[in-house]
Image (tube, rainbow, N blue to C red):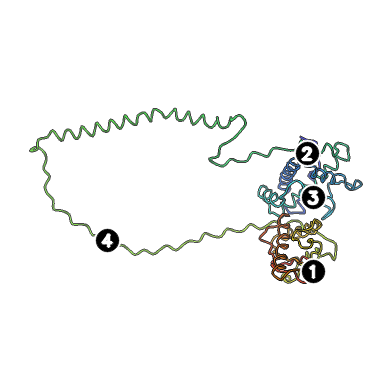
Amino acid sequence: MSTLRKMIESLMTPQLLARLAARSGIPATTIEKGLNGSVTSLLDGLAGRAGDPRAMSQVTELMTESPDEPDDPSRVTDEEDGPVQRRGRKLVAISTSDPGGLARRLGQQVGVGPAAATGLLGTAGSLVTLALRKLFRSGAIDPAALPAMLRDSRELPAVAAVPRGEPVRVPGGGAARAEAEPVARSHRRRWWVLALIPLAAIALWLYGRGRGGGEERLEPSMRPVEPSRPPAAPATPPPAEPTTPAEPTTPPAQPTKPRAAAPRPTFPQGSIEAKMLAHLAKPNADKQTWFALEEVIFPASSTILRPESSAQLDRVARILAAYPDAEVEVAAPTDSTGDKEARNDQAEARAENVRKALVQRGIDEDRIDVRDFPAPANKATAIRVTKQ
């Protein structure tokens, strides 16, 4: 086992798993399975980017920033949106280009919803970052040796079940030969049965010919004469009973598996995120209240999100993960230039990019609607709750 993996395992203590289970409501065994799968995926992704100088520079920055900050594993659960969680999310973004897809696959493997899987993936990112920082501070690793350590930490994925009818490929072909040999022996055991088939056919033919020859040797006068019978009247079929067409049966609807809720985050009092959380906690909350996301911004004449939008999008995704049944609508502002149709197209394209950013953070696409005209007052990107 690599040095990095040993350090990560030392951080995943039973106490940490128990605290994560208490916060999320997910069994500790499921959390451990999800964290192990997430760590393997993240390390494999980082190993695949070990030859990318830009990616290695980003990982080095996570290892070396804030050198006086304590790297205590308990901070993974103590803090809601602290530097440990922020570094973990950055590491996930470095290791994979599709965090949302990775979270969905992880959720299917361990049996949790997308929101809970996204939380497990972020926690795994925090643990990997903590392990790298500890190794760096102890002198066991330096930026120059980082690519080699990441390659050494890669694990081959577990062998997946082979679908029926697909060839099994193993080193040396042993499994294929082991499967083929009993088949060949089975064919050798049945060859004598196949050889008897033509002999039986010949015997049947001779038997039938002997019966036919005996009849031909009888003289005409000796042949038995059957009495003539009047032709039978054709039978009249009984009238068909009318049939009632069977009523189509509708299969019973399968119960929808409820989405698992992520831990409820906390934000500074008075912030727009805290107001949105309080709004979602109200029963029958007003569906016309818009929340301005002033940090989600676009360059002039562009529909591409600026990099500094990421932090607030992370916070919004955590809110939606904590309320997995909530649905929202996103609206975006437009530039003041162009005709009405052009401004509407720009607003819709910008809002669509906000939706894609939230989907990449593990939120189901069908929970997010996009407005095809500018946001209220056309001042900032905005979001409102349409269903609780």
Residue denoted by label 2: 150
Q: Quadrant of the N terminus?
A: top right
The crowding category of the residue bearing disc 4, from other C-alpha atoms within 10 Å (few below 14, some 14 to 19, many at least 20), is few
Q: Do the residues labelled 2 and 1 touch (CB within 8 Å)?
A: no
Amino acid tagged 3: Lys
Secondary structure at numbered mark 4: loop
The crowding category of the residue bearing disc 1, from other C-alpha atoms within 10 Å (few below 14, some 14 to 19, many at least 20), is some
Give whichever of discs 2 and 1 has the lower sequence position: 2
Amino acid tagged 4: Pro
Give whichever of discs 3 and 4 has the lower sequence position: 3
Amino acid tagged 2: Leu
Is 373 placed left or right of 271 in the picture?
left
Amino acid tagged 1: Lys
Taking the view exactly as shown, the residue that stands out farthest to the front is 338
Mark pair 3, 2: CA separation: 17 Å
Residue denoted by label 4: 238
Mark pair 2, 1: CA separation: 45 Å
Of badges 1 and 3, the one in the foreground is 1
Q: Are marks 1 and 3 in contact (CB under 8 Å)?
A: no
Give whichever of discs 3 and 2 has the lower sequence position: 3
Of badges 3 and 4, the one in the foreground is 3
Q: Which mark is residue 379?
A: 1
Q: Do the residues labelled 2 and 4 touch (CB within 8 Å)?
A: no
Residue denoted by label 3: 90
Of badges 1 and 4, the one in the foreground is 1
Secondary structure at numbered mark 2: helix
Q: Position of residue 312 (x, y in %)?
A: 80, 59
Mark pair 1, 4: CA separation: 82 Å
